[in-house]
Amino acid sequence: MYLTKEKKEEIFEKHGKGKNDTGSAEGQIALFTYRISHLTEHLKNNRKDYNTERSLVSLVGKRRNLLDYLKKKDIMRYRAIVKELGLRK
């Protein structure tokens, strides 16, 4: 499995307030970004895997909604997470 408990804790500790803070927008965005990158690599090798493609589109939408929420609530946190994760906007 590509996403172990330890990897999740590491992501939330780095981008959230702590390893048990799974509800923060930054932590969730970072987790979604990790999962999106993994699914993108999978789809490069398995281009006809339409179920995974659908999951990828869903994850991108969820991340976009969280980014929009963060942008509306606190623009500085939004800019920080976008810069930290290297997202386009």
Image (cartoon, rainbow, N blue to C red):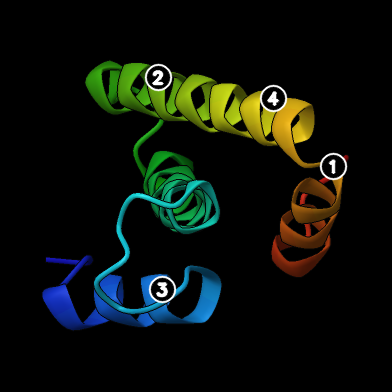
Residue sitting nearer the eye, 6 or 77: 77
Sequence-wise, which precedes: disc 3 or disc 1? 3
Q: Nearer the viewer, mark 3 or mark 1?
A: 1
- Numbered badge on residue 75: 1
- Picture residue at 80% right of the left edge, 61% below the top: 80
Is 33 located above or below residue 10 in the figure?
above
Q: Which residue is mark 3?
A: 11
| Residue at numbered disc 4 | 68
Q: Amino acid at mark 3?
A: Ile
Marks 3 and 4 sit apart, C-alpha to C-alpha, by 21 Å
Q: Image check: 25 left or right of 39? A: right
Q: Are marks 2 and 1 in contact (CB under 8 Å)?
A: no
Disc 3 or disc 2, which is closer to the eye?
Answer: 3
| Sooner in the amino-acid sequence: mark 2 or mark 1 | 2
Q: Disc 3 to disc 1, how far (Cα)? A: 22 Å
> 4 left or right of 79?
left
**Quadrant in the rendering for residue 51:** top left
Q: Secondary structure at mark 4?
A: helix
Residue under label 2? 58
Residue type, mark 2 in image: Ser
* Amino acid carrying mark 4 in the image: Asp
What's the amino acid at mark 1?
Ile
